[in-house]
Image (tube, rainbow, N blue to C red):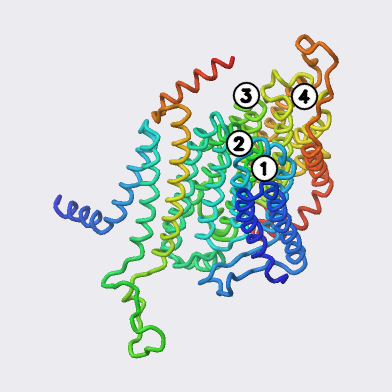
Amino acid sequence: MTDQLPALIIISPLLAALLANIAGWIQKRLCFPAAVAGLLASFLCAAFLMRRVIAGGPVVYRLAGWNPPWGISYYIDNLSGAVLILVSLVALINMLANREVALTMFENRLGAFYSLYLLFVTGLMGIVITGDAFNLYVLLEIASLTGYALIGMGGGRARISSLHYVFMGTIGASLYLFGTGYLYMVTGSLNMADLAALLPQVEKVSLIEISFILCLVGLFIKMAFFPLHAWLPNAYSHAPGPSASLIAPLTTKVMIYVMIRVVLSVYRPEFVFKALPIRDLIIWIAVAAILAGSVMAFKQRRLKRMLSYIIVVEVAYMVGGFWLGNAAGMTGAMLHLLNDAMMTLCLFLAAGSIVSRVMSDEFSYLQGVFQKMPFTMVAFVAGALSVIGVPPTCGFFSKWYLISGGIAAGQYGFAAALIISSLINALLFFRVIEIGYFEPFDMHSHGAEPVFEEASAGMVVPLVATAGLILAMGFYANTLVAWFIEPIVPVVLAGGG
Amino acid sequence: MDAPVLADMLDFVIAKYNYWGIAALMMIGLYAMIAKNNLVKKIIGMNIFQTAIILFFISIATKWDATIPIIIHGHGAHAHSIHAADYMNPLPHVLMLTAIVVSVATLGVALALAVGIFQRYETLEEDNILEQLKADESNLR
């Protein structure tokens, strides 16, 4: 049984998607339990598998018993195990928190919503676990297509934003597929481990370079790296609440994971960092992305839209940190990947909670929101402090790694951009906190004392738990690094950039 | 002097004609996605872009003097030894079967969204939709 854990991680949400859809036709009350059961099973399998990986090293699972170069294999090492746990946990928390919102928002489409939700998670988990370059493309499209549908389920501008996302996302995935085609052309293999062994023997290096650039640009579009980010703010801020707080923490982070995986276990860091002269270029684009994203975030007058631009900034942190190419930078990027998913979840859930009561996320509506929704806002502040990078929260530790990596690599521009962006983040969030805390609740229209109107317990408990996780990930940052990240950072680079 | 250069160029173009075709298709698709105003035309452009990559995979599977990869005598028939060079590579075709499914699904999602947009805005011309969106925003203020 335990040998089959990797397959169960993927199968349980997939089966649950089917069940949730059937339940939507027969008995709507059963959709939610079926979906939660699927995600919980997936989460538990991922956690057990992680224990095995930490004890005994990476696990290779051969689907249907076919050996790797011919069959598809699943490959789980410390980092992918950690991302698997993260994805299933974020999806689970978000599903629990949005139970009532989903009920009112998707009354007649509940089965469709939950099965899309689960298929999306299946796609992301598959992307993380797979050891096959073409399989990765298919799962990438499964996750994207369900994501488009989840965003398009919202009213108003959601559909047009989703359609623009379809255009950009399809170009990104197609470029990745194109790059994979070149890889297949020069090696005749699609298995990642096999590719890594075959690529150094290839004489036509230019073809590998082309394929790498194509894959990288495709992934940059998918993760919304700055000049290619245009689809993200609209798609995420117009998406319905439950979809936004699922897609926003996960999609970009999983795409960054794919970039890390592709560099470390397909093209190999020796080739990527030594043979290609694009390192400095990417770091400078990241610097521009951090600054531009911060400025654009500052211009927004709606909470979710501001958070969407902050995601663009965070993506640039991770891409830049990874491309520093030294141990500290990579550790920072990977740790930030885990942390950022949690803090984005926290902030988007808090925004969803506010919208569920205030009915808007415009700043002018947030007056006195601290008095009305104390628990939500405490969680919001925890998430905000983590994005700013204040010590007890997890955001501080990853940012510390990133900055020290930037200094060690001599990329002072990157380190400076990180510090400036922290300051701007502080401004951004204190503006929201100021409106919510110090500006009084509008007495003229309501007349009486502000009513204590916290969101429902089903929403607040998962939200506060997320805030707790942010603190816990901060306290145990060293453990996270030792368990999940240190075994992954390539030895070649441990000496520094 | 000029003639050999021209001949070389022609050889270069002809020898790699599949790449030229694929590049042309990709550019047609991209052009449609960027320049066309009608959402359905954009969606079809996206589909052309995907098709170009499918054709790229198919074209790298071919070999000179090779036939379709069907082995008639099957298992146990050791009368003929099989040379891989005599058969085209079937794997890219199989991969593209999956990619075609993906592109059909993408087309379906995109068209469904376009239908939803049409129901709301009663037009598929993007600049008309943007005008309506602007009008909506200024009404809210």
Percent of width and height locating residue A189: 47, 67
Q: Where is residue B43 in the image (x, y as percent from the top left)?
A: 40, 40
Q: Earlier in the sequence, mark 4 or mark 1?
A: 1
- Tell me the amino acid under the disc marked 1: Gly
Q: Disc 3 versus disc 1: distance between alpha carbons?
A: 29 Å
Have a look at marks 4 and 1 and say if they share a chain: yes
The mark found on residue A433 in the picture is: 4
Q: How many labels does the image show?
A: 4
Front-lying residue, B141 or A389: B141
Mark 2, mark 3: which one is toward the viewer? Answer: 3
Q: Which of marks 2 and 4 is in front?
A: 4
The answer to whether A3 appears left or right of B20 in the picture is right
**Badge 2 or badge 3: first in the primary sequence:** 3
Pointer 1 residue: A406
Q: Which chain carries label 1?
A: A
| Label 3 SS | loop
